[in-house]
């Protein structure tokens, strides 16, 4: 039973990791669906074999397999959601989204049942409304039940007061309209302003644009660490300026951490590095010394040694 629970936990963690990669745009929806189906099939086969073995040991006919029930201790959150909605039921589920520590968390309500589904990082190229709609459609498809969803009160998780947000939006629209009217009325006056004022305004705009694009180019190493890494083999600087992954962090003989290798591949995808970088990493020898790769705002350097494994550092410029 302990081994069965461990396998269920591993499958759930693996599925969550690939969901986060899908949210970040590192893999396609088709790739994610294939991985999910594979994991669910493996879990189903493992469950059938385990149940059959238990029935044979207890003198029960394998034909009684359809009546076997999983205990709640053997199910992870995703399996619970499947079990609750397994019967043919057209009653809509309610999914509430809320911000928890900078991540969007989804909660499924089915009558008096409350089932945590998952939490994830919202992709930067999606609005909160688009992300909530996409996840709600995925839950509806996976669980086979119609879904009604409630979006969080704020876009970024900072303002959780819907009334304040609505008032702020109304005030912003009103202020914008007032400014436009004022600009129209005073259009003739603006042409008579001191040229020095116009030059100063242009300088401020240039500085603001430079600061904006500098922020846009800066790689999100903290986000890559949260999505792909574990502190067992990865280290993130407190200020988020560098990320190090070591496939043999304790320099053990004949040891390689496969999760660390997978994390390097996933971080490369999240940071939009070309496939040639991973190919170079895989072919690096001890006598090659430190290898490097640079792009706008990011520098990557790595070393390999048979006794110490592959060590990769991502540094924000």
Image (cartoon, helix red, strand yellow):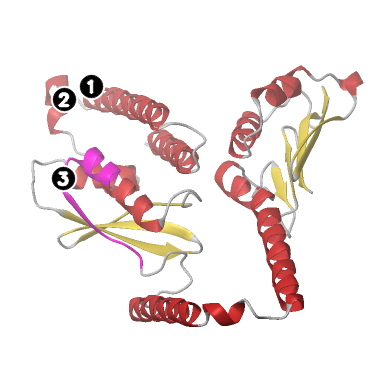
- As displayed, is residue 156 above or below residue 50? below
Residue underneath mark 3: 145
Distance from the alpha carbon under mark 3 to that under mark 2: 34 Å
Horizontal and vertical percent position of residue 164: 38, 81
Residue 56 numbered tag:
1
Q: Nearer the viewer, residue 131 or 168?
A: 168
Name the secondary structure under disc 3.
Answer: loop
Horizontal and vertical percent position of residue 295: 75, 37
Task: Report whether 313 appears left or right of 270.
Answer: right
Magenta segment boundaries in residue numbering: 137-152
Q: Determine the residue positioned at 67% across, 56% down.
A: 215
Q: Are marks 2 and 1 in contact (CB under 8 Å)?
A: yes
Residue underneath mark 2: 60
Distance from the alpha carbon under mark 2 to that under mark 1: 6 Å
Horizontal and vertical percent position of residue 43: 34, 29
Q: Is residue 257 part of the magenta span, yes or no?
A: no
Q: Nearer the viewer, residue 315 or 62?
A: 315
Q: Nearer the viewer, residue 183 or 98?
A: 183
Residue 82 numbered tag:
none
Query: Quadrant location of residue 176?
Result: bottom left
Distance from the alpha carbon under mark 1 to that under mark 3: 36 Å
For the question of whether residue 71 can be seen, the reply is: no
Q: Determine the residue positioned at 11% across, 41% down.
A: 87
């Amino acid at each position: 039973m302990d081994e069965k629970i461990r396998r269920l936990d591993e499958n759930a963690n693996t599925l969550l990791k690939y969901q986060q990669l899908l949210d970040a745009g590192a893999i396609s929806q088709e790739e994610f669906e294939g991985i999910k189906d594979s994991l669910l099939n493996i879990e189903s086969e493992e469950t059938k074999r385990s149940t059959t073995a238990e029935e044979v040991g207890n003198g029960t006919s394998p034909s009684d397999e359809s009546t076997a029930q999983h205990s709640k201790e053997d199910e992870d959150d995703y399996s619970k959601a499947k079990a609750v909605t397994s019967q043919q039921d057209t009653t809509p589920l309610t999914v509430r989204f809320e911000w928890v520590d900078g991540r969007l968390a989804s909660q499924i309500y089915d009558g008096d049942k409350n089932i945590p589904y998952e939490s994830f990082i919202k992709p930067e190229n999606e609005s909160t409304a688009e992300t909530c709609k996409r996840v709600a459609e995925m839950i509806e498809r996976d669980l086979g039940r119609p879904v009604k969803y409630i979006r969080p009160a704020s876009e970024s998780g900072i303002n959780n007061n819907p009334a304040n947000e609505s008032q702020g939006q109304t005030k912003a629209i009103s202020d914008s309209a007032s400014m436009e009217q004022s600009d129209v009325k005073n259009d003739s006056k603006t042409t008579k302003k001191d040229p020095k004022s116009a030059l100063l305004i242009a300088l401020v705009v240039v500085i603001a644009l430079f600061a904006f694009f500098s922020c846009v180019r800066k790689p999100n190493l903290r986000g890559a660490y949260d999505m792909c890494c574990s502190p067992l083999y990865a280290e993130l600087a407190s200020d988020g300026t560098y990320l190090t992954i070591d496939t043999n962090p304790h320099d053990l003989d004949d040891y390689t951490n496969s999760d660390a290798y997978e994390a390097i591949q996933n971080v490369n995808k999240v940071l939009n590095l070309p496939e040639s970088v991973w190919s170079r990493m895989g072919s690096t020898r001890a006598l090659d010394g430190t290898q490097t790769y640079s792009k706008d705002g990011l520098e990557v350097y790595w070393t390999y040694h048979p006794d110490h494994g592959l060590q990769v550092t991502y540094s924000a410029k």
